[in-house]
Image (tube, rainbow, N blue to C red):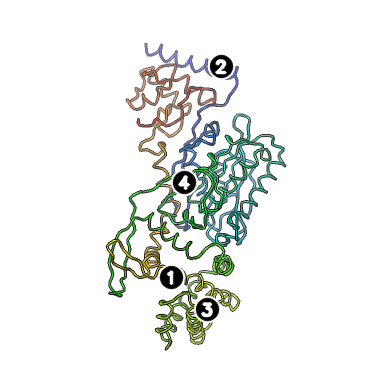
Amino acid sequence: MKVLKSSLCILLTLLLIASIAVTGVSAAQNALTVGTVKIGGLFADRWEEQNYYYSDDYFRTSGKVLNEHLGSLSALSAFYIQQPDAATPEENAGFLKELGFEDLVYGDLDVMTSDSIGSLIGRKTVDGVPVIAVELRAEYSNEWASNFLAGNEGDAAGFAASAKKVEDRLLDYLSTRGMKKAKYWVCGYSRAGVVANLLGKTLNDNLDSFATTEDDIYVYTYEAPRCTPDPVAYENIHNYIDENDIVPKVYPAVWPMGRHGVDVEVGDTEATIMTKEFTPIEPYGIDFKKVDRSEFLDEFVALLGTNLDRQTYVEVLEQPLNELLDVAFDLSQDDFKALGDFAKVAGEKVKEDPNFLLTMLTFIADPTSKDSIKNVCDLLKRGIDAAVESEGMPVVAQVFEKITAAIPALVTALAPIIKADGLHENEDGSTVTFYYLTTAVLNALNIVSYHFNYNLFERIKMQDPYYSEDVQLLGDVNDDGEVSILDVTFVQRHLADMNLLDESAQMRADADSDGEVSVADATLIQRYDAQMTVPEGIGQPMIGV
């Protein structure tokens, strides 16, 4: 009997090979690629290895429908392009290549200035239609400075200029290849997320120019800041937002500002933040209190936006802040350290100034007074001059002058915010001096950590069933993470009583889901491996098994 079963299995294999040779290969409807990829964080020394799940099926359904699996994959794609500064454009493209995208075009991946935007465009064909991937880089260096270019009206100027550059690159890619029809997969994180958001609007508003339809646009953004006073709820733009992260709350909604598309909330709704409350009655006393993190950040950003409106921001702070950041990102680590040491000395010189106490008390009493602002700026200048006299200039004169020149604008812009935050009243009637500013400063690292992409991905995974514990693929009989011809062999050996499968393996081997392992299952697994049409589910995770 065993010999007979073995012979039947061998005959089945030969018949299948012959069938494939005659029929030819057609696209598998449900092929799922499972692998691992490393993503970098905001710092090059922090890396996380994550599983990824890719299927062409993601682009066979409408982009208007949120696909949690594509949401996770898009996040990894957006995070992967954020490689260390030393990475080459080819290294940035590694993940897209692994997913089967080719004909790659790099845009400013080796350029980092205050007005650049890194992009990677590639394509692969699904059912005869090119899927064009647009992967955008979130770089935390000079490019970040353009985040603060708001402009007087319309979309935030820095973001809009970057989106226009990517739009031009995409149109050029389309025209030089003569494409008559295309699907678009766009993803970005943080600054790149808001650029992806604006690019998504452009695609939706110019369907003919991009040879596409609303169903063929798949835009996934992560922690994207607000960018437009006229947001449109495009169903094919999916914005993953953690309300506990301050970045998506900027620019202030009170300006007003929003983002296009539909927000997908992730994160802990019970998250809190610790405040240290200083009361005017006991100026050196500290009262600890936990408050709702998301609500605090909403109130804090509203405080900033209400007391520094868009027009005032542009007139007073935008240009000096942009120049200051651009200079700062060009500094070496040694220069940063030298500036930090210099700032400590300058701070001591300021406190030693005979007019320090009177100047600060007057400023706190009325921070928006022109005389108060001038006196504080003069006080800071005297302290800086005294530090230069004793320590020398910490960086080259041109850089030092740009940094110090920004001080008056910073003080002027902060003055109304300080005044508004001067006295905060708690629910119990107690008062707190500089509640929002103090809390934000004391919790700065904690607030920023929610934006780190490796932390964010842990929250994204919670919405994707593929990342549940012990994911098993239907057809992956030997549980090695992929469905292959080797799995057919395991089924054949089981049917021949040569190597019986355990209960879990039998469930994975039951490709037609009829409750038993049979020759038909071996046939389906072999057809799947040969990229022939098979029933839905083979090669995909068996959720809950």
Q: Which residue is mark 3?
A: 394
Q: Amino acid at mark 3?
A: Pro
At horizontal 67% and vertical 38% (from top left) the residue drawn is 208
For marks 3 and 2, the one nearer the N-term is 2
Identify the disc placed on residue 240: 4
Q: Residues under labels 2 and 4: Cα distance? A: 46 Å
Labelled pair 2, 1 in contact (Cβ < 8 Å)? no
Between disc 1 and disc 3, whose residue precedes?
3
**Circle 3 sits in a helix, a strand or a loop, which is it?**
loop
Earlier residue among tags 3 and 4:
4
Q: Residue at x 57, y 64 (%)?
A: 311
Whole-number angstrom distance, CA of label 3 to CA of label 2: 77 Å
Q: In 3D space, how far apart are the residues under numbered discs 1 and 4 (Cα atoms)?
A: 32 Å
Q: Secondary structure at mark 1?
A: helix
Element carrying mark 4 = strand
Q: Image point 41% across, 11% down: which residue?
A: 4
Q: Residue at x 42, y 27 (%)?
A: 474
Residue 159, horizontal then vertical, whole percent: 58, 55
Characterize the local packing of mark 1: few (<14), some (14-19) or many (20 or more) Cα atoms within 10 angstroms: many
